[in-house]
Image (tube, rainbow, N blue to C red):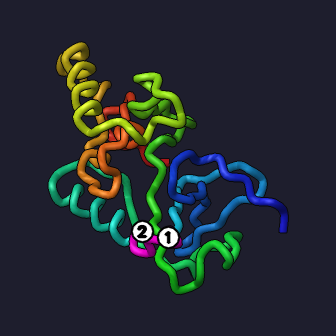
């Protein structure tokens, strides 16, 4: 098997995958897919289950979220067993940054505020909220600018600037 390349930023190991029925396949050509699969952290095995629960909770609270699933490593093709065992849980989420016409531009608050990459996890939730409110005031009630509320609710993120997103669609895009 060739060397795996990772292009999705963040702390948690994740892959852009293609869905075929109940299976998710990591494309080796670099073409990416319509879903993201997040693997469990070696120190925190329940992160996928927690993320799935938080997204379901957000949906139940009325937040518009992409389709999500909690699956086993055995449902993945092309991901080495050294990264995830067949019985370990993985979190799958439909990519909201893809639409039928291609990619949807998305920026996180760390990018918007020009936070240095080494400091993007140091910003507080309060700073994120202040920046979001400044953007909202400037945009008025324009539906084309809105933060993704899911980053605010997930306790594991502890207010990281990189976890609040601004995107230019009024609804989540589905591939």
Label 2: element kind: helix
Disc 1 and disc 2 in contact, CB within 8 angstroms: yes
**Towards the viewer: 141 or 112:** 112
* Direction from residue 35 to residue 80 in the image, left or right: right
Label of residue 174 in the image: none
- Dividing the picture into quarters, in which one does residue 45 lie? bottom left
1 or 2: tag closer to the N-terminus: 1
**Closest to the observer, 112 or 115:** 115
- Disc marking residue 48: 2
Instruction: Specify start and end residues of the magenta stretch as a single range.
Output: 41-48
- Identify the residue shown where x is 51% and y is 57%: 12
Q: Which residue is at 46% across, 23% downward?
A: 114
From where the camera sits, is residue 143 visible?
A: no
Q: Position of residue 23 (x, y in %)?
A: 57, 73
Tag of residue 40: 1
Q: Position of residue 88 (x, y in %)?
A: 51, 81
Please identify the residue farthest to the left as the structure is shown. 61
| Residue at the far bottom in the pictured view | 87
Q: Quadrant of residue 78?
A: bottom right
SS assignment at label 1: loop
Q: What's the distance in space between the residues labelled 1 and 2, CA to CA?
A: 6 Å
**Is-magenta flag for residue 95?**
no
Give coordinates of residue 101: x percent, y percent: 55, 35
Name the residue at 24% across, 51% down.
153
Looking at the figure, which quarter contains the N terminus? bottom right
Q: In the displayed structure, does residue 40 sit left or right of residue 150?
A: right
Check the image and report above or below for 17 versus 109.
Answer: below
Magenta-drawn stretch, dominant element (helix, strand or loop): loop
On the image, the x and y values in percent for residue 61 come to 15, 55
Towards the viewer: 92 or 100: 92
């Amino acid at each position: 098997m060739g060397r795996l390349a990772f292009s999705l930023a963040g702390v948690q190991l994740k892959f852009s995958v293609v869905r075929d029925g109940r299976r998710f396949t990591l494309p080796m050509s670099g073409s990416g897919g319509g879903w993201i699969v997040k693997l469990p952290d070696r120190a925190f095995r329940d992160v996928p289950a927690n993320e799935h629960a938080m997204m379901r909770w957000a949906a139940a609270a009325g937040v518009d979220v992409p389709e999500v699933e909690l699956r086993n490593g055995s449902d993945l093709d092309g991901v080495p067993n050294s990264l995830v065992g067949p019985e370990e849980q993985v979190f799958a989420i439909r990519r909201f940054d893809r639409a039928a016409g291609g990619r949807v531009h998305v920026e996180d608050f760390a990018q918007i505020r020009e936070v240095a990459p080494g400091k993007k996890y140091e910003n507080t939730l309060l700073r994120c909220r202040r920046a979001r409110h400044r953007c909202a005031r400037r945009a008025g009630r324009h539906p084309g600018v809105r933060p993704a509320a899911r980053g605010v609710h997930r306790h594991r993120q502890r207010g990281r600037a990189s976890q609040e997103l601004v995107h230019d669609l009024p609804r989540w895009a589905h591939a």
